[in-house]
């Protein structure tokens, strides 16, 4: 281990201990010293993990690796444990075994539904992937999962993402039209106003048509067709821009969440 | 004092940006870590000084509020916590706002999750919001915690026809038939409104495809910002409105506070986040402008 790495590690450990002691001494509303110690440790450890993850922005390092692996491990373990208790104990055992229900203290459904043994059998088959010789058996379960998912999704996507979306594009270009006099006398930029509704519908209809034209490569993109194609690419670019803006907002939200934790829960320095 | 601090911080941030602009124009590269540092300090400044902005609800958010507001007392409201701690800062405020609004209107709450980590966050809502702010509500009569079920869209495909097949018991292993809230509920289609909250898979999209459309149930998703643009096309035919990212959550908190003064003193994390959001966005936009100015100047120099 390099000298600089040892010094950094030592500083981190010392800061961790100092923070733990400080948070233990300032822990609010606790019944015992043990509770204060636990609370102090949890807040300090959470702060350490946050800073360890953020340290990647500077460069890759062992603290980041530790936090990343811990996060993945804890998430997987949590999902597995909850899956066991909610699905196996909650859904399977009450339908197949009165004895198991007794062990896990859940109510037996009253009758045995043997068809519910098929999913755990498929689950065991899936685990055969871990076996060097019997790995091929897991393909049966995997095929079942892929087939079922495709079968479930096809009609739903066909209805919601295809038919409903197409019919949603058939919009009136003149909303509540009662002549130019009525239109100009009620002209406003209100989101619920007639002008904005007409404009929105026009953008949706023209955007969809021109966006599709951009992806139509059997005809050369020039003349009126080319103009429509250019309009289509503008619509696409604006859409991507909006998506990027939303993504930035999402990432900043996460940063705000962690900084609020560090500055409020850990350091306790937020004013107001 | 805090006013002076804000001005000094803003002066330092924007002074720094001007320095970087000059630095870039001279043809020097800016290390990416400097950009991170600026975003970090801009965000931290807004958090430290608690900079807030007034939010006006947009139509798409107001539609959601108005629909919940117009439902008669005792309507059935299902909230699905389809997110994990990584998504928590932007969507958890939505969940809490929906819970507050539903309970103040005396609706019946059904809480469930398609994500394992969602159950822990659901528990947090129950402990910190329901039990603290609404001590009069009774478990099983006013709200129920169904918890997490594995199976992704398979779960939704079952509960749209029969809740009991997928949820024979609640999260505490209490038989669903002994819970009064389920006396007149057979499936998810019996709900008066559903709030799927999340941003991954399974999430709001699956709720629209597997429950909203086939069951004709009004849906109002609360979305992580990353997926919001993907759900917008479903408005207004397939969803009655939506909350996109922390901005949507802030708008909802704002309208909830203005309608119900009792919520003036409860935390509004999304509203608090809009200050840091605004400042961070200004810094990012500044860097985009700096990058473009430098790019065009370099190109002009190369062509000359």
Image: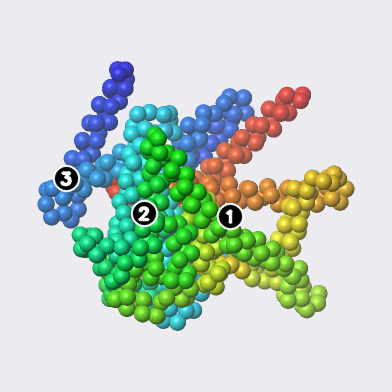
For the residues carrying marks 3 and 2, which lies nearer the camera in this image?
Answer: 2
**Which residue shows up at 58% across the image and 43% down it?**
B285
Helix, strand or loop under label 2: helix
The type of colouring in the image is rainbow
**Residue A35 placed where, x, y %?**
16, 50
Which disc is residue A120 wearing?
2
Position in image of residue A111 (x %, y %): 31, 70
Residue tagged 3: A37
Q: Quadrant of residue A187?
A: bottom right
Residues at marks 2 and 1 touching, judged by CB atoms closer than 8 Å: no
Q: Is B207 placed left or right of B236 in the picture?
A: left
Q: Residue at x 51, y 28 (%)?
A: B31
Tell if the residue under mark 1 belongs to the same chain as the one under mark 3. no
Mark 3 to mark 2 CA distance (whole Å):
43 Å
> Residue A50, position in %: x, y?
35, 41
Labels 2 and 1 share a subunit? no
Label 3 CA crowd tier, 10 Å (few <14, some 14–19, many 20+): some
Check disc 2: other Cα within 10 Å, few if <14, some if 14-19, many if 20+: few
| Circle 1 residue | B229
Instruction: Tell me the number on the disc at residue B9.
Output: none
Q: Chain of mark 3?
A: A
Marks 1/3 in contact by CB < 8 Å: the verdict is no
Of label 3 and label 2, which has the lower sequence position?
3
The secondary structure type at the circle numbered 3 is helix
For the question of whether residue B111 can be seen, the reply is no
Q: Residues within 10 Å of mark 1 (few under 14, many from 20)?
A: some
């Amino acid at each position: 281990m390099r000298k600089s790495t040892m010094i950094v590690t030592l500083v981190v450990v010392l800061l961790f201990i100092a923070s733990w002691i400080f948070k233990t001494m300032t822990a609010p509303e606790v019944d015992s010293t043990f509770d204060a110690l636990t609370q102090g440790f949890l807040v300090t450890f959470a702060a350490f993990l946050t800073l360890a993850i953020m340290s990647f922005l500077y460069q890759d390092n062992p603290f980041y690796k530790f936090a990343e692996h811990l996060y993945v491990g804890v998430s997987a373990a949590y999902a597995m444990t909850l899956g066991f208790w909610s699905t196996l104990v909650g859904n399977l055992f009450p339908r197949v075994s009165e004895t198991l229900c007794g062990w896990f203290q859940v109510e037996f459904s009253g009758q045995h539904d043997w068809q519910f043994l098929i999913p755990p059998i498929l689950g065991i088959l899936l685990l055969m992937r871990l076996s060097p010789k019997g790995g091929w058996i897991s393909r049966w379960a995997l095929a079942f999962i892929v087939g079922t998912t495709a079968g479930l999704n096809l009609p739903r996507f066909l209805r919601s993402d295809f038919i409903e979306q197409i019919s949603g594009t058939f919009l009136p270009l003149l909303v509540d039209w009662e002549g130019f006099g009525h239109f100009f006398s009620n002209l406003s930029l209100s989101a619920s106003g007639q002008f904005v509704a007409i404009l929105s519908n026009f953008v949706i209809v023209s955007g969809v048509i021109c966006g599709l034209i951009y992806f139509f490569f059997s005809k050369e993109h020039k003349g009126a067709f080319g103009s429509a194609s250019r309009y289509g690419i503008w619509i696409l670019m604006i859409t991507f821009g909006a998506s990027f803006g939303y993504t930035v907002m999402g990432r900043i939200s996460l940063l705000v969440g962690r900084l609020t934790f560090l500055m409020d829960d850990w350091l306790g320095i937020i004013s107001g | 004092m805090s006013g002076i601090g804000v001005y000094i911080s803003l002066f330092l941030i924007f002074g720094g940006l001007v320095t970087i602009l000059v630095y870039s124009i001279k043809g020097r590269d800016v290390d990416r870590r400097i950009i991170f540092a600026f975003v970090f300090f801009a965000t931290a400044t807004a958090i430290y000084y608690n900079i807030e902005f007034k939010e006006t609800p947009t139509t798409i958010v107001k539609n959601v509020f108005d629909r919940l507001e117009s439902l008669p007392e005792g309507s059935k409201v299902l909230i699905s916590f389809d997110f994990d701690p990584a998504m928590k800062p932007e969507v958890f405020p939505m969940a809490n706002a929906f819970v507050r609004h539903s309970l103040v209107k005396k609706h019946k709450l059904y809480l469930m999750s398609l994500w394992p980590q969602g159950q822990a966050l659901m528990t947090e809502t129950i402990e910190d919001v329901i039990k603290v702010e609404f001590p009069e509500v009774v478990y099983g009569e006013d709200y129920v915690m169904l918890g997490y079920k594995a199976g992704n869209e398979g779960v939704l495909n079952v509960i749209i026809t029969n809740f009991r097949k997928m949820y024979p018991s609640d999260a505490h292993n209490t038989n669903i038939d002994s819970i009064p809230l389920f006396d007149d509920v057979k499936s998810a289609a019996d709900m008066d409104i559903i709030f799927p909250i999340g941003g991954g898979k399974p999430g709001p999209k699956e709720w629209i495809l597997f429950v909203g459309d086939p069951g004709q149930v009004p849906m109002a998703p609360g979305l992580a910002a990353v997926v919001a643009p993907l759900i917008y096309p479903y408005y207004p035919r397939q969803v009655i409105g939506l909350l996109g990212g922390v901005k949507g959550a802030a708008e909802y908190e704002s309208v909830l506070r203005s309608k119900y003064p009792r919520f003036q003193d409860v935390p509004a994390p999304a509203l608090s986040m809009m200050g840091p959001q605004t400042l961070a966005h200004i810094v990012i936009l500044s860097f985009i402008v700096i990058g473009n100015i430098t790019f065009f100047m370099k190109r002009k120099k190369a062509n000359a």
